Image (cartoon, rainbow, N blue to C red):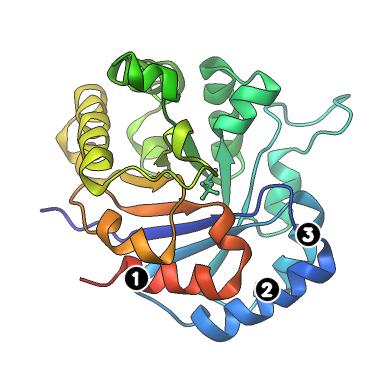
């Protein structure tokens, strides 16, 4: 089986003031600042990026991520943030197309594709989210939804570009609900998604592509999920807001 280093990312969403961010990052540096078995990313809100960036300056093993960006390089887009602005703060990753952005801010696969290009243009690594709603799962449409999101949002890249991308499968019904997909359920979707990438980009690319699982990941379920052959990491929301639980997830993710 091809080796893919696990990547565990914490998505703080709209949580934590700068003072709160300082406290948790201090604890994370102590606990996992030297942990090397997985890539670790934390994604604070825009307002805390600068302070967290400073704190992580000498920490090799925790990388900084943003939760969103605008697709244009600059201009009259009140309230928006560009890839270059993020890059200058030493942001390395950026979450794109999170289901909350799709649901509350109308983001489409086309916009996702544009944002991926903008991120890559500034040497930011996109974490691109895909996933079906409860209704779509119950109507047995998840395959169609996943395939449409991949082909519509993540298919127009060359081989070098796709190698910078991490995909996050996040079933919308499992986000913030406490309803986690079982390892088996998640594995089925991950394997299906990887098959589509193989169809688009070929075996070598799909073997290297990291696909995270997201949706109510907790210290208790991280190991079962992350031991699945096609699950290469986790995108953690709620449980990333607490240093102890995020640390436990990172460590459990790499436990056999
Ligand atoms: P959750 O969120 O871990 O709170 O379910 C995951 C996400 O939205 O990325």
Q: Dot 1: within a 10 Å radius of its alpha carbon, few (fewer than 14), some, or many (20 or more) residues?
A: some
Q: Earlier in the sequence, mark 3 or mark 2?
A: 2
Q: Residue at x 71, y 44 (%)?
A: 84
122 vs 9, left or right, is: right
Q: Earlier in the sequence, mark 3 or mark 1?
A: 3
Query: Between marks 2 and 1, how big is the CA–CA gap?
Result: 19 Å
- Asked if 158 appears above or below 25 in the picture, the reply is above
217 vs 210, left or right, is: right
Query: Between marks 3 and 1, how big is the CA–CA gap?
Result: 27 Å
Write down the residue under mark 1: 252
Q: Are marks 3 and 2 in contact (CB under 8 Å)?
A: no
Q: Quadrant of residue 222?
A: bottom left
Q: Which mark is residue 24?
A: 2
Q: Residue at x 34, y 19 (%)?
A: 138
Q: Quick one: SS at disc 2?
A: helix
Q: Residue at x 24, y 38 (%)?
A: 185
Residue 94 visible (yes or no): yes
Q: Quadrant of residue 108?
A: top right
Q: Dot 3: within a 10 Å radius of its alpha carbon, few (fewer than 14), some, or many (20 or more) residues?
A: some
């Amino acid at each position: 089986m091809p080796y893919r280093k696990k990547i565990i990312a914490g998505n703080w969403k709209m949580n934590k003031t700068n003072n709160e961010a300082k406290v948790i990052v201090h604890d994370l540096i102590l606990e996992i600042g030297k942990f090397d078995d997985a890539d670790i990313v934390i994604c604070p809100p825009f307002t805390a990026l600068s302070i967290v960036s400073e704190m992580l300056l000498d920490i090799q093993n925790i990388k900084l991520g943003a939760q969103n960006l605008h697709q244009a390089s600059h201009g009259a887009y009140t309230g928006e943030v560009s890839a270059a602005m993020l890059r200058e703060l030493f942001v390395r990753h950026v979450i794109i197309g999170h289901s909350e952005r799709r649901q509350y801010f109308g983001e489409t696969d086309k916009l996702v594709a544009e944002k991926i290009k903008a991120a890559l243009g500034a040497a930011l690594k996109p974490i691109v989210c895909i996933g079906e709603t409860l209704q779509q799962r119950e109507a047995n449409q998840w395959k169609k939804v996943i395939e449409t999101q991949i082909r519509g949002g993540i298919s127009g890249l060359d081989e070098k570009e796709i190698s910078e991308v991490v995909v996050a499968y996040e079933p919308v019904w499992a986000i913030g609900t406490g309803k986690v997909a079982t390892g088996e359920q998640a594995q089925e979707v991950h394997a299906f998604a990887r098959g589509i990438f193989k169809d688009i980009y070929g075996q070598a690319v799909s073997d290297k592509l990291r696909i995270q699982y997201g949706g109510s990941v907790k210290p208790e379920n991280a190991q079962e999920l992350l031991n699945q052959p096609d699950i290469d990491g986790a995108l953690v929301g709620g449980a990333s807001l607490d240093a102890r639980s995020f640390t436990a997830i990172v460590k459990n993710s790499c436990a056999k």
